[in-house]
Image (cartoon, rainbow, N blue to C red):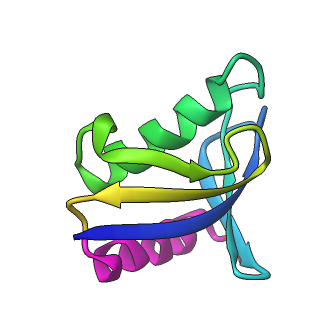
Amino acid sequence: MRAQVAIRVQPRAARERVAGFTAGEWKLSVAAPALEGKANRACIEFFARGLKVPRSAVRIAAGETSRHKRLEIDGVPQEALDRFLQSQLSESGAR
């Protein structure tokens, strides 16, 4: 079982949050800068912490050097990932 998600990362944000959904991508704001892979690590940690899986279960399948990324999360059904993202969007008050 492996879930996938397309995200657009906004580095150097004031706080980590799901900031919206546009053009088939979830917008994820992270506080880390886009230097030396710090924003990538922040994305992985955000999903690992939120979905309660080890960081090793979350990987960047495409877009390692781009703001547009595709993540794969092992051990999580797609429905659970979708519910998590919707709940994060509701909590942040974003659209």
Against 62, is 37 above or below?
above
Against 34, is 76 above or below?
below
Q: Residue at x 56, y 71 (%)?
A: 89
Q: Residue at x 35, y 52 (%)?
A: 50
Where is residue 61? Give x, y as percent. Answer: 53, 52
Where is residue 69? Give x, y as percent. Answer: 67, 55
Along the viewing direction, whichever of 4 and 49 lies nearer the viewer: 4
Along the viewing direction, whichever of 27 and 75 lies nearer the viewer: 75
Task: List the single residue furthest toward the top.
Answer: 36
Magenta stretch holds residue 78: yes
- Quarter containing the C terminus: bottom right
Left or right, residue 2 beside residue 14: left
Along the viewing direction, whichever of 34 and 62 lies nearer the viewer: 62
Name the main secondary structure of what is drawn in magenta. helix
Left or right, residue 5 beside residue 7: left
Along the viewing direction, whichever of 78 and 89 lies nearer the viewer: 78
- Quarter containing the N terminus: bottom left
Q: Residue at x 29, y 75 (%)?
A: 80
Against 12, is 23 above or below?
below
Left or right, residue 34 beside residue 17: right
Q: How many numbered circles are shown?
A: 0
The stretch of residues the image draws in magenta is 77-93
Q: Residue at x 66, y 40 (%)?
A: 30
Left or right, residue 45 beside residue 37: left
Magenta stretch holds residue 68: no
Asked where in the image residue 25 lies, by quadrant, the reply is bottom right
Where is residue 53? Give x, y as percent. Answer: 23, 47
Where is residue 45? Give x, y as percent. Answer: 43, 37
Asked where in the image residue 20 lies, by quadrant, the reply is bottom right
